[in-house]
Amino acid sequence: MTAHIIDGNLLSKKLRSEVAERAAALAAKGRRPGLAVVLVGDNPASQVYVRNKIKACEDNGIHSVLEKYDASFSEAELLARVAALNKDPQIHGILVQLPLPAHIDSHKVIEAIAAEKDVDGFHISNAGLLMTGQPLFRPCTPYGVMKMLESINYPIRGAHAVVIGASNIVGKPQAMLLLQAGATVTLCNSKTRDLGHHTRDADILVVATGKRNIVTADMVKPGAVVIDVGMNRDDAGKLCGDVDYGPCAEVAGWITPVPGGVGPMTITMLLVNTIEAAERY
Ligand code: GUN
């Protein structure tokens, strides 16, 4: 079997054109949607992510503001900036890029963002709303994964979904969204014994560990959907995911590539959340 590819660039293109239409409709009513992106420090990966987010806004009619501060920026200064953005009527969404430098308490900063502008969906109120099945904002990466499953009309109800990685950004909200869509969910973490025992029974396998090749072909159920959230570099410096792509694609029914899979979808769902925030404002 050779898996069908779920193309995140292609799906993003379609969804982004819908975003651009909604942005234009809002702008025509005098409410140009606005996103503020705050970056503290010089993490090279964060710089790339942030640049891509700003560019995606520009390309789709969303006003964006990038606030960059050096690594010595204090927690108090950052909290003051967040408070100012909360009050700014031009700004409907606020994103503070993670990770933050070690001297800043990221929980404190996330809780300082107004929940109705928290387009990442990381605020404790938004996590609670998601948990209880009444989401205001769905975190962008797991939301993008759900859109990918929707794009292939995958019958999630009753399926066994296995998520590897239990972060607040991806794994936990992913498990919640799959559960609410009717899947039976197994959430694995770095301490899970015999990972393959779980993955071999997965109809849907979502991998978000940051560990290259953690999923090998012998761990994949024939015909399964394999969604790779990983973003790593191989020995030659080339971008790759968490899944041993070539051999796994011989076993899976559907698979997402890296690059060109989940990555563009994360940014696309950030745009969608920003539009929703501006429409609700
Ligand atoms: N760092 C890695 N992924 C994300 C994300 O989706 N949002 C933010 N704010 N920081 C991140």
Image (cartoon, helix red, strand yellow):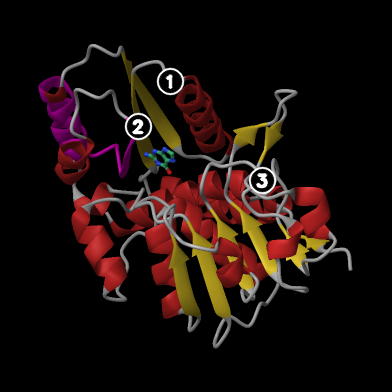
Closest to the observer: 69 or 212?
212
| C-alpha separation, residue under disc 3 versus residue under disc 1 | 24 Å
Tell me the amino acid under the disc marked 2. Pro
> Mark 3 packing: few (<14 Cα in 10 Å), some, or many (20+)?
some
Q: Quadrant of residue 60?
A: top right
Residue 162 seen in the figure? yes
Classify residue 74 as left or right of residue 168. Answer: left
User: Does the residue tagged 1 have its C-beta within 8 Å of any atom of ligand 1?
Assistant: no
Q: Considering the numbered disc 3 on the image, is that residue within a helix, a strand or a loop?
A: loop
Is 92 colored magenta in this rendering?
yes
**Residue at the spot of label 2:** 99
> Mark 2 packing: few (<14 Cα in 10 Å), some, or many (20+)?
few
**Residue at the spot of label 3:** 213
Is 178 colored magenta in this rendering?
no
- Residue at 68%, 32% (x, y): give it: 239
Q: Considering the numbered disc 1 on the image, is that residue within a helix, a strand or a loop?
A: loop
**Residue at the spot of label 1:** 43
Tell me the amino acid under the disc marked 1. Asn
